[in-house]
Image (tube, grey):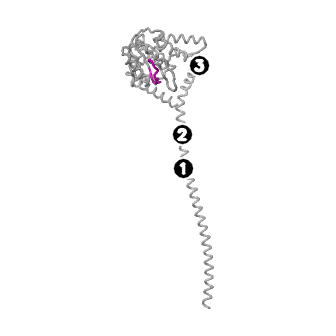
Amino acid sequence: MKIVTPKKIELAKAVEMSQEAQKVWDAAKDRLAAVVAEMKRLVEALEATQAEETRLRNNKDDCERKVELAKALITGLADERENWKVDLAQRRIDRENLVGDIMISSGIIAYLGVFLKDYRDECTQNWAHMLQEFHIQSTENVTINKVLGDPVKIREWNIQGLPSDDFSTDSAIIQDYSDRWNLFIDPQMQANIWLKGRHKENVVVCKPTQDSKQMSRSLENSIQFGYPVIFEDANETFDPMLDPLLAKQIEKKGSEMYIKFGENGIPFSPDFKFYITTKMSRPHYSPEICVKVTMLNFMVTEVGLQDQMLDIIVSIEENAKHEKRIHCIKTKAENQKKL
């Protein structure tokens, strides 16, 4: 007992000391866990702060780049300020002259296609003076090209074979805006060459000397399938078979269009085009024919030849400027489509 009792006392003390040490250990462990958690939170906060710093730096760089671009744009557009002022002033003038210009252009399309350029210009000037008497303004020296001309389309026509002179261009614009079929006075075959170049695919050529039945079949197929037809070497009179076609006797049945041709009506394709050309320089058509078609004069004139020769010379002597002009026309068209 003398040995056991002291040992028990020492054991109790040791147990008590162990328990105290365990409490200290647990407290230290809890403090360590709290420190670890706090460190983890601080690391996450640091990473978030660094990410935010990176984002702000990127935003700063992006803003600086945009500022530089804006400065460059403002500097570049400053030179266009005067051009815009001039263009705005011209637009306001055009708006005031719009009614008169459209009236004169409508008259040119309806009445002046058959005449030469000098007479067209004379009539246009007379009409402008008449409009002024009714307080309707129009552009000075107005032309149908200035009012209705599309430079891109005109350039495409030139590539297809249209002569580049003003007279031929005006006649082509009249043709493009006319609702009636066109009859071309074309002794030099300029219009014929252009039309064939314009409708390279599926173009059908008919002539008065052609067999009547064969021509009828060709026209029927073209009308139904939308093939363009060029009626070449027309005389001053036409086969009665063509009267419904010349008069555009088209009627709608259900959802389809029909035209009277021959004994029965046949389907009419909206893609169908009918052009008439004659080599006669001074044909005399009856009033019945004149009211059914739009007559266009494509005769070669001295002024027209000068314009064509000038365009050829410029393309040869100043090819760089000629190509630059074509490029500017195409670029303008692309920009207008984007707008």
Which mark lies nearer to you, 3 or 2? 3
The vertical placement of 36 against 185, above or below, is below
Q: Along the horizontal axis of the image, is 253 left or right of 7?
A: left
Query: The magenta stretch spans which residues?
Result: 262-273
Whether residues under marks 3 and 2 lie with C-beta atoms below 8 angstroms apart, the answer is no
Which mark lies nearer to you, 1 or 3? 3
Q: Along the horizontal axis of the image, is 45 left or right of 167?
A: right
Marking on residue 96? 3
The chief SS type of the magenta part is loop
Image-quadrant location for residue 210: top left
Q: Is residue 269 magenta?
A: yes
Image spot of residue 302 (x, y percent): 41, 11
Q: Dot 2: within a 10 Å radius of its alpha carbon, few (fewer than 14), some, or many (20 or more) residues?
A: few
Image-quadrant location for residue 89: top right
Image spot of residue 99 (x, y percent): 57, 18
Exactly how many numbered labels are in the figure? Answer: 3
Q: Amino acid at mark 2?
A: Lys
Residue underneath mark 1: 54
Image spot of residue 230 (x, y percent): 40, 18
Residue underneath mark 2: 66
Whether residue 117 is visible to the viewer of this picture, yes or no, is no
Q: Along the horizontal axis of the image, is 333 left or right of 15?
A: left
